[in-house]
Amino acid sequence: MNYLFVLAAVLELLLFFVILWLTFFLSTLVHELGHAALSRLAGVKSPWQIRVGFGAKLLGTKHLTVNLWPFDGYFDLPGDPKLSRKSAVLTLAGGPLGSLLLFGALLALRLSGVIGDTPLISESTLKSLVNISLYVNGAIFLYSVIPTHYLFGQIKGMPSDGLQIVNILKGRQTKNDDSGDDPQE
């Protein structure tokens, strides 16, 4: 058996998983930064924190924690700031909007025809990476706007951004109530 072939296959598989991890990480980070950006535009002055992923901590700073498995995220305004309905809705809408904007940019890139061969990566591989990124961002967008409770990760059981927005617009209590809704997710 050709050991170089096996080594190349293993390295290619490792590279695929690294790229997949980076795709989920960056997609989740953009979603959570969308919350942070719109909270600032809504006039919220509270400090913020973002957590990307769950499991073992890889990085921890004042504003960002990165964990091993980047399949969920959380935006928080510590200290229980009192937000107006408008500020809460804008803050919640920021994440899905960030995901939607990234999806749109990736779709425009995919449809533009500018993806071609490079010295290191073939055109078909680049298109596949963009397609995977499109699927990930589309899923994050849909999963966050559908009014439901999250099904996995550290956010399991928490209300989605969409459900929190619906609750706010219906005038339901969204902070410190029995359902655990938190407008800063």
Image (tube, grey):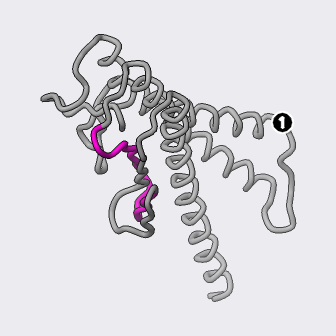
Q: Amino acid at mark 1?
A: Ser
Dividing the picture into quarters, in which one does residue 104 lie?
Answer: top right
Image height of 21 relative to 42, above or below: below
Q: Nearer the viewer, residue 161 or 43?
A: 43
At 47% from the left edge and 30% from the top edge, which residue is drawn? 142
Badge 1 crowding class, 10 Å Cα cut-off, few under 14, some 14 to 19, many 20 or more, is: few
Q: Estimate the x, y position of residue 180 in percent, counting from the top left.
A: 20, 34
Q: Nearer the viewer, residue 118 or 101?
A: 101
Dividing the picture into quarters, in which one does residue 111 lie?
Answer: top right
Magenta residue span: 64-80
In which quadrant of the rendered image does the N terminus lie?
Answer: bottom right
Asked if the magenta segment contains residue 67, the reply would be yes
Q: Estimate the x, y position of residue 122 in percent, counting from the top left.
A: 80, 59
At 52% from the left edge and 35% from the top edge, which residue is drawn? 40
Image height of 64 relative to 108, above or below: below
Image height of 97 relative to 128, above or below: above
Residue occupied by mark 1: 112
Q: Estimate the x, y position of residue 140 in percent, counting from the top left.
A: 48, 38
